Image (cartoon, rainbow, N blue to C red):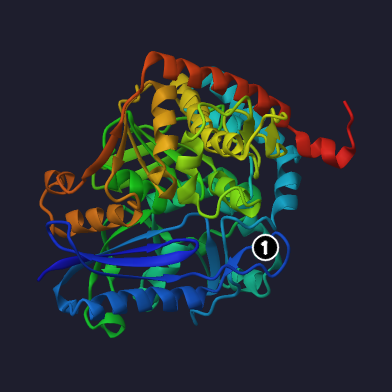
C-alpha cells in the first residue's frame, strides 16, 4: 500500500506519521527531545541526538506498521523555526549544539545593534524612502529591530564566539542551517544544503519583499554568504533519502515550517483565512495573499508557502507565554491537571473583577513591551480559587482578541474564516469566550495537533500522491463550531475585556520598575 511519511521536528518532541490516500494513519511514533540549558539564558539541542531521534521515529513508524519502505511515495518535513546550527562542510561535524529559538545569549548583541548608529541610519533611511515611494519594503526597514527570537543576532554571536567558525567561514567550508537544513543534510549524506522559503523568512536574514536573502542585514552584520543554504520552493523535490537510512531512496518533496504547516493543514488557503495555534505559545497567522504585509505594531510578514507559481504570505503575531498560564496555576496547586480548568472556570458566573495578565515573557502586539511582567489584580476578600482560574483562562481569550484587533486594524484583507488548533483548544471555555468577544464563529478540527499534516499534504501533492487540493480538503474534519452566545453574555465578556486592558497597561515596563526601585 502506497503512503506518505510526515515528520514534525518540534522543540520538545519528534513525531512521524504514515498516511494513506484517505488520510488514515497507518502507523505513527514519537520520541522526546532533550533541551539543554548549560548556562542561564542558554537553550540548546544536541544535533546528533536530534538526528538519531529523527531516524528512530521514521524507522519505528515503518517497522511497527509493517510497511514496505519502497512503497513510501514521499517524505514531508516540518520543523521548529529559528533554531540553527553551524557545521563543517567537509566533515559534517557540528561546531556547536543547535541554538534554539528560546535562547537568550544574544541579548547584549540585540541591545548593541539596536542602539548603534548603523541601525539608526538604516531606520531613518527606510523612513525617508518610504515617505517618498510609499513602498512597504522601506516601511519594514524603518522599523526593523533585532530580537533574540530571530536567528540574525544569535548567528552574529555564534560566528564571533564558536571556536573554529571564522576560520572555516574564511575557507568557505562552514555551513549554517536551521533544523530543516540540518535534517536534509543528514538524510542526503551531505549532498543537499537547502531550506525552504517558510523556514528562512522569519530569521531576519531574508527580505520578503524581494524574495531573497537580505543584502542589508547580511552586509550590516557582516555575514559570509558562502555559509547560507539554497532556498527552495516549499513543495518540490529536495533530493532523496539515502537508501541506507530507511531501506529505500524516498523522495523528499515537502519542507515547511511548523506554524505555516498548520495553516496549510487547516485549509487556510485564501486571503482572510486565519489560523491560530494555542499551545505552548499563541501563534496567529492570517493569509494575506501574494503580497507581504508591513506592520507598525508587531505583525510580521512571513512566507506561508511557495509551490510553483503560488506564493502565499502570512501576517503573523505571537504570544509565547500561553502555556505558562496553566504551568503557573498548577505550580500553585489551583488545579492538578489543565483538563480540570474548564469545569472550575464554569463553576462561577464571572471572575469577580479579577484580571490575570499572562506576560511571563513580556507583551507582544500592539504594545511590544519585553519589560512587561505577568500580574494579577482585583483580588478582594471574596475572591476564590474559581475566580482566579476563570481569570487565567479569560486572559488567553483576551490576548487572542487583542492580537485579532491589531490585525483587523492593519490588514487590507477582511478576516473570513477562523480555525484553531493546539492543546489549549481542547478547552471549550476558552474557545467560547473567544467567539463571544469576536462575535465570530470559531472552528476546531477533530485533530487539534495539525502541524505534521501540512508537511504531509504538501509533500503528497508535490509527488502526485494526491492529484488536487480537493482531495485533501475533504480530509479536514470539524469537531465543534463555537458561535457567539446571547447578547447579554457577549456584553458581559466585553466589559471584563475592557477591565483587563486596564490591567495590562499597569503591567507595562514593570520589570524596569523592579530593577530601578521606581515607586511612582
Q: Is the residue marked by circle 1 packed among few (<14), some (14-19), or many (20+) residues within 10 Å?
A: some
Q: Mark 1 points at which residue?
A: 42
Q: Nearer the viewer, residue 46 or 167?
A: 46
Residue 511 image point, x, y percent: 78, 39
Residue 196 image point, x, y percent: 37, 55
Residue 240 image point, x, y percent: 26, 72
* Residue at 16%, 77% in the rendered image: 70
* Residue at 16%, 67% in the rendered image: 3
- The answer to whether residue 213 of the structure is visible from this angle is no
Q: In this view, does 110 lie to the left or right of 74?
A: right
Please, is residue 405 above or below residue 46 in the view? above
Please, is residue 467 above or below residue 73 in the view? above
* Residue at 17%, 44% in the rendered image: 473
* Residue at 25%, 58% in the rendered image: 456
- Which quadrant does the N terminus fall into? bottom left
Q: Is mark 1 on a helix, strand or loop?
A: loop
Q: Which of 120 and 158 is in front in this view?
A: 158
Asked which quadrant contains residue 271, the reply is: top left
Q: Is residue 46 left or right of residue 197?
A: right
Please, is residue 114 above or below residue 47 in the view? above
Residue 358 image point, x, y percent: 61, 39
- Which quadrant does the C terminus fall into? top right
**Count of marks, rendered view:** 1
Q: Which of 228 and 143 is in front in this view?
A: 143
Asked which quadrant contains residue 40, the reply is: bottom right
- The answer to whether residue 429 of the structure is visible from this angle is yes
Asked which quadrant contains residue 443, the reply is: top left
Amino acid at each position: 500500500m502506497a503512503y506518505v511519511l510526515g515528520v514534525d521536528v518540534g522543540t520538545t518532541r519528534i513525531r512521524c506519521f504514515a498516511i494513506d490516500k484517505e488520510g488514515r494513519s497507518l502507523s505513527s511514533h514519537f520520541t522526546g527531545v532533550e533541551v539543554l540549558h548549560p548556562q542561564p539564558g542558554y537553550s540548546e539541542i544536541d544535533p546528533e541526538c536530534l538526528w538519531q531521534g529523527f531516524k528512530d521515529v521514521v524507522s519505528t513508524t515503518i517497522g511497527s506498521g509493517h510497511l514496505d519502505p519502497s512503497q513510501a511515495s514521499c517524505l514531508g518535513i516540518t520543523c521548529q523555526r529559528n533554531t540553527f546550527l553551524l557545521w563543517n562542510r567537509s566533515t559534517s561535524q557540528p561546531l556547536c549544539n543547535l541554538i534554539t529559538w528560546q535562547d537568550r545569549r544574544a541579548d547584549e548583541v540585540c541591545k548593541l545593534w539596536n542602539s548603534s548608529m548603523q541601525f539608526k541610519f538604516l531606520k531613518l533611511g527606510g523612513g525617508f524612502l518610504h515617505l517618498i515611494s510609499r513602498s512597504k519594503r522601506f516601511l519594514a526597514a524603518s522599523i526593523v529591530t533585532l530580537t533574540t527570537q530571530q536567528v540574525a543576532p544569535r548567528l552574529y554571536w555564534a560566528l564571533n564566539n564558536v571556536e573554529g567558525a571564522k576560520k572555516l567561514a574564511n575557507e568557505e567550508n562552514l555551513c549554517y542551517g536551521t533544523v530543516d537544513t540540518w535534517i536534509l543534510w543528514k538524510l542526503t549524506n551531505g549532498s543537499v544544503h537547502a531550506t525552504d522559503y517558510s523556514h528562512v523568512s522569519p530569521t531576519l536574514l531574508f527580505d520578503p519583499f524581494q524574495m531573497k536573502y537580505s543584502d542589508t542585514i547580511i552586509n550590516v552584520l557582516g555575514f559570509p554568504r558562502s555559509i547560507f543554504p539554497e532556498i527552495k520552493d516549499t513543495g518540490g523535490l529536495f533530493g532523496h533519502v539515502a537508501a541506507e537510512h530507511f531501506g529505500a531512496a524516498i523522495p523528499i518533496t515537502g519542507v515547511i515550517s511548523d506554524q505555516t504547516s498548520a495553516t496549510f493543514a487547516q485549509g487556510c488557503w485564501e486571503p482572510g483565512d486565519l489560523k491560530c495555534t494555542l499551545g505552548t505559545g499563541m501563534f496567529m497567522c492570517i493569509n494575506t495573499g501574494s503580497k507581504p504585509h508591513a506592520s507598525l505594531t508587531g505583525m510580521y510578514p512571513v512566507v506561508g508557502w511557495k509551490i510553483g507559481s503560488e506564493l502565499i504570505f502570512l501576517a503573523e503575531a505571537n504570544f509565547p507565554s500561553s502555556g505558562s498560564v496553566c504551568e503557573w496555576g498548577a505550580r500553585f496547586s489551583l488545579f492538578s491537571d489543565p483538563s480540570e480548568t474548564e469545569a472550575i472556570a464554569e463553576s462561577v458566573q464571572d471572575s469577580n473583577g479579577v484580571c490575570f495578565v499572562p506576560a511571563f515573557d513580556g507583551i507582544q502586539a500592539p504594545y511590544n513591551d519585553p519589560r512587561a511582567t505577568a500580574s494579577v489584580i482585583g483580588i478582594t476578600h471574596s475572591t476564590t480559587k474559581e475566580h482566579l482560574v476563570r481569570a487565567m483562562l479569560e486572559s488567553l481569550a483576551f490576548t487572542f482578541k487583542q492580537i485579532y484587533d491589531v490585525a483587523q486594524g492593519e490588514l487590507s484583507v477582511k478576516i473570513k474564516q477562523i480555525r484553531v488548533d493546539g492543546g489549549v483548544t481542547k478547552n471549550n471555555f476558552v474557545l467560547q469566550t473567544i467567539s463571544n468577544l469576536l462575535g465570530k464563529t470559531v472552528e476546531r478540527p477533530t485533530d487539534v495537533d495539525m502541524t505534521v499534516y501540512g508537511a504531509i499534504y504538501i509533500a503528497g501533492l508535490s509527488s502526485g500522491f494526491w492529484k488536487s487540493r480537493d482531495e485533501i480538503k475533504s480530509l479536514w474534519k470539524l469537531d465543534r463550531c463555537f458561535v457567539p452566545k446571547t447578547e447579554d453574555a457577549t456584553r458581559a465578556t466585553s466589559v471584563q475585556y475592557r477591565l483587563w486592558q486596564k490591567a495590562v497597561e499597569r503591567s507595562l515596563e514593570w520589570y524596569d520598575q523592579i530593577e530601578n526601585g521606581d515607586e511612582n
